[in-house]
Amino acid sequence: MHAETSPDAANPMNFEGSVVLVTGGTKGIGRSIAQRFADLGASVAVSARNAAEDLPADWHFVAADLRDGDEAAGMVDQVVDRFGRIDVAINNAGGAPPADTATASHRFTERVVQLNLLSSIYVAQQANHHMQAADGGSIINIGSVTAMRPAPTVAAYGAAKAGLLNFTRTTGQEWAPAVRVNCITAGLVRTEQAAMHYGDNDAIERIERAIPMRRMATPHDIANACVYFASPLSSYVTGANLVLDGGGDLPAFLVDREG
C-alpha cells in the first residue's frame, strides 16, 4: 500500500504496507529516520558501504558504494526485488571532513562531490524509474545549510549540497505528478558524534546559544520532517526546500571567535 494512497484518511502517518529506503541508514541521522518509519509500520531498507551488527532483524540491508552509479542503481533494484515496490527513497548518505579549500586534492574534492551530490542523483533516478512505473512515490533529499551560505573548510561539500538543492527543485517539476521530490535543509544536528564536529560541551553550549531555538536539531527532528514529506499531508508539495535550522545559526568558527 502506497503511503500517499492510504485509505486510512484518519491516520495519515500510517505507513503499513509502504516500503521506505534510507541511504546511510545504519547510524546517526539515517538510523533515526529509518527507525521512525519502522515505528510507523513501514517496511524499511537501509543502505551503506558496511553493515551494522545491531540492525533490527526485520530491516533489509543492502551494501553499496553509492558513489558508483551502477552500484547505486543496483541497490535500488535489490530493494524492489525484495519488497516488490519502493514508495519512499531518502537520500541521507553524505558528509565530509574539513579541509583547506586552497590545498584540497583533486581526488578529495571529487570524492566529496560524488558522495554528497552524485550518489543522491543516482539513487533518485532509479527510484523514480520504479515509482513512475507503479503508484508513484516520494523522494526526499537531506541537504545542509552550507548550500545556502558560505562554508569555510567544507567548500566542496557546500557546493555539492547546493547542487542537490537545484536537483530537487528541477526533478520536483520534471517527475511530478506521480513522484514528488523535496529537500530538507538541515542546520546543526546534535548526534552521538557532536563532539567530533563541534567541540566539547562548553563549545556546544556556545553554539546553541546562537540558535534562536536555543538548541541544535536532533536526528528525530529530521526524521519527523521526512515523515511529513512522505505522508499524504504533503501531497501537493514538490520541489520544496524545508529549512530546519532552529531559526538560523552562526557558523561554528564565528561563534568560537566571539568566545
Image (cartoon, rainbow, N blue to C red):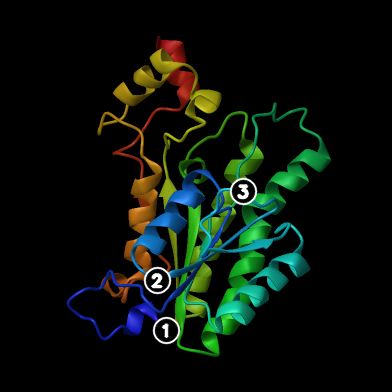
Q: Residues within 10 Å of mark 2 (few under 14, many from 20)?
A: many
Earlier residue among tags 3 and 1: 3
> Compared with residue 253, is residue 51 higher up or lower down, i.e. above or below?
below
Q: Which mark is residue 156?
A: none
Q: Secondary structure at mark 3?
A: loop
Q: Quadrant of the C terminus?
A: top left
| Number of marks in picture | 3
Circle 2 is placed at which residue position? 238
Q: Secondary structure at mark 1?
A: loop
> Compared with residue 93, is residue 120 higher up or lower down, i.e. above or below?
below
Earlier residue among tags 2 and 3: 3
Q: Quadrant of the N terminus?
A: bottom left
Q: Which mark is residue 53?
A: 3
Residue 157 image point, x, y percent: 62, 42
Residue 249 image point, x, y percent: 37, 32
Residue 152 image point, x, y percent: 58, 29
Q: Nearer the viewer, mark 3 or mark 1?
A: 3
For the point 35% across and 19% down, the residue is 205
Q: Secondary structure at mark 2?
A: loop
Circle 1 is placed at which residue position? 177
> Compared with residue 92, is residue 246 higher up or lower down, i.e. above or below?
above
For the point 46% across and 12% down, the residue is 257
Quadrant hosting residue 15: bottom left
Q: As shown in the figure, which amino acid type bears the numbered disc 1? A: Pro
Q: Are marks 2 and 1 in contact (CB under 8 Å)?
A: yes
Q: CA distance from mark 2 to mark 3?
A: 36 Å
Q: Nearer the viewer, mark 2 or mark 3?
A: 3
Q: As shown in the figure, which amino acid type bears the numbered disc 2? A: Thr
Q: Residue furthest front?
A: 57
For the point 69% across and 50% down, the residue is 50
Q: Are marks 2 and 3 in contact (CB under 8 Å)?
A: no
